Image: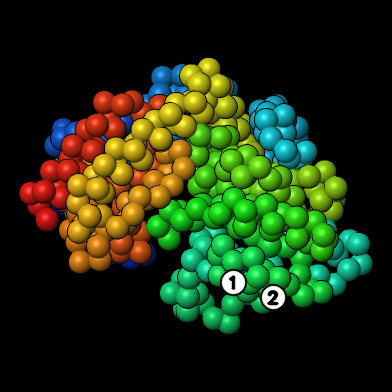
Amino acid sequence: MLDEIKALDKEYYMNTFGERLPVVFTHGKGMKLYDDNGDVYYDFLGGIAVNALGHSHPVFTDAIKNQVDKLLHTSSLYYIENQARLAEKLVKSTCAEKVFFCNSGAEANEGAFKLAKIYFYKKGIDRYEIISLDHSFHGRTLATVAATGQPHYQAPYKPLTPGFKQIAPNDFNAVVDAVTDKTAAVMVELIQGESGVHPMDIEYAKKLREFCTQKGILLIVDEVQTGMGRTGKLFAHELYGIEPDIFTSAKALGNGVPIGAVCAKAEVASAFEPGDHGTTFGGNPLATAAGLAVFDIIESENLLDNADKMGKLFRLKLSDIMAKYPDKVVAVRGEGLLIGIELKPEIAKSVFISLHNRKMLTSLCKGLTIRVAPPLNITESEIDLFIDTLDTVLKEDI
């Protein structure tokens, strides 16, 4: 089947992903994915931090099946029970006071930009600039590309949407220097995932929060990858002891069902009035049923505690690998179950391919860092399987 699918993809699909890894998966269970030959792979990437519950979690699957049997979509012209209940769940579980649902992380970040701008517009204040960080990643739309601090994503789409500028991460003086009387918001990923899992310093985050408050600037935290338990807390800003004015969520919120959320303090959220923003699919009965099921399973199975405990164990074992191969492993970074393993440039791609060939699924960030983001219900034995495989790759394949 693989050859057939590759041929169809080449013939009919826009070539945005290039030559993909040569595998087609047909089904999954827990950490395991099965290809068309019946071979078993272990998903240590979790669909890029999406499948927080693993594959085919029985409670999640039943919730989706039950909703499909009842209702998929009605539109935002009518009240939606699941939408209201998921909004309540997010508010009661976080520092947010209002929620808006959309369909993706990029769309959530777009919503955050719009909310920040209209907040000052409604006050009659001319603030529209949004500051973000170098090496950040906020999405693929035109505005989120303008906010993404990676020039190779921006180059083909110039002139970029105006009003965005990037500064060095973890540099508080850079923030002070960049702010003007036109600055509406500062947007950060507290752990930059796509660039290689780079956490912000806690002191930097706290000073940033204090500075934004002093200057009347909104603080936006992009939690698309770090949210819903990925770091051992429901959202990463809890680790940092700060409360953003706006934060965004997606990825694991739906465990594979597309959904995004803009979460905000009530004063900021009040800037959105009828007609200012909207969506056709966002927050529909199916997507929000998925979100409710994710919340229920995280709580009932104590997955925040497991992500914290297993994440610390994983990083400890990876530190032992780094000590064993100091000429090959440069650094181990991350929080919870979002982990980056930086390798020497000359071997990084080979390690990534060797892990894939040995049925371990990861991603390679910036050509240097193996990113690991497994399901939150990962076990110690599954971590040991990865550690043993990485050890073998570094010892025998490289």
Q: Residue furthest bottom?
A: 159
The local secondary structure at tag 1 comes to strand
Residue 132 location (% of width, % of height):
61, 66
For residue 214, above or below residue 134: above
Q: Which residue is mark 1?
A: 167
| Closer to the camera in the image, 86 or 37 | 86
Label 2 sits on residue:
177
Q: Residue 126 is drawn in which quadrant?
A: bottom right
- Of tags 2 and 1, the one toward the viewer is 2
Residue 273 versus residue 249: which sits nearer the camera?
A: 249
Query: Could you say whether the residue bearing mark 2 is in a helix, strand or loop?
Result: helix
Question: Residue 303, how many percent across, how many down?
Answer: 48, 25
Quarter the C terminus occupies: bottom left
Which residue is found at the position 81% from the left and 70% from the top? 127
The residue at the far right in this view is 124
Q: Is residue 46 visible?
A: no
Q: Amino acid at mark 1?
A: Ile
Query: Could you tell which of marks 2 and 1 lies nearer the N-terminus?
Result: 1
Q: Quadrant of residue 94?
A: top right
Compared across the picture, whether 163 is left or right of 150 comes to: right
